[in-house]
């Protein structure tokens, strides 16, 4: 039987629009690359079907407008120290994005 070790840490979410860029590349790609470069586990990007942000502009997916600048969420499950490091990296780079952080408990299932 496989024993799971439950870890405590942070669920870190960044929110932006799909076409948002930082240093000439998509912010989603930049965040994932930075996390990978600094050895911070994994991250995922999720696209919304509709949403609005701090500027009050509604973006929604419609059949003929699939390429619209929809909201996206980039998220990471990290140890608290890793979350602090990633947030500081984003701050130092001058990234313009909204983020949320919540406590998380997580573990690896399986043997790989």
Image: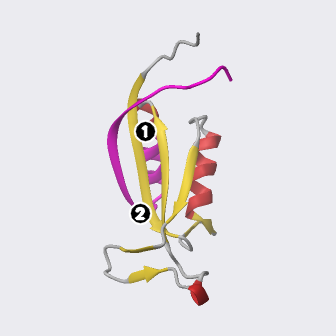
> Residue 54's spot in the image, x, y percent?
31, 73
Residue at image mark 2: 97
Magenta-colored span? 84-112
**N-terminal label among 1 and 2:** 1
Disc number for residue 38: none
Q: Is residue 59 above or below residue 39?
A: below
Helix, strand, or loop for circle 2? loop
| Color encoding of the figure | secondary structure
> Residue 80's spot in the image, x, y percent?
39, 32
Q: Identify the residue shown where x is 43% and y is 56%.
A: 14
Q: Identify the residue shown where x is 43% and y is 62%.
A: 15
Quarter holding the N terminus is top right
Q: Nearer the viewer, residue 89 or 61?
A: 61
Residue at image mark 1: 83
Q: Nearer the viewer, residue 92 or 43?
A: 43
Q: Is residue 103 magenta?
A: yes
Q: Residue furthest top?
A: 1
> Within 10 Å of the Cα at label 1, are there few (<14), some (14-19), or many (20+) other Cα atoms?
many
Q: Identify the residue shown where x is 56% and y is 50%.
A: 44
């Amino acid at each position: 039987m496989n024993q799971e070790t439950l870890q405590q840490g942070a669920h870190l979410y960044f929110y932006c629009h799909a076409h948002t860029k930082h240093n000439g590349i998509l912010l989603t790609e930049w965040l994932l690359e930075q996390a990978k470069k600094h050895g911070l586990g994994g991250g995922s990007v999720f696209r919304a079907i509709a949403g609005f942000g701090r500027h009050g502009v509604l973006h929604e997916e419609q059949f003929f407008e699939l390429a619209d600048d929809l909201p996206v969420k980039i998220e990471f499950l990290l140890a608290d120290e890793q979350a602090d490091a990633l947030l500081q990296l984003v701050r130092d780079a001058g990234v313009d994005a909204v983020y949320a952080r919540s406590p998380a408990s997580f573990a690896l299932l399986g043997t790989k």
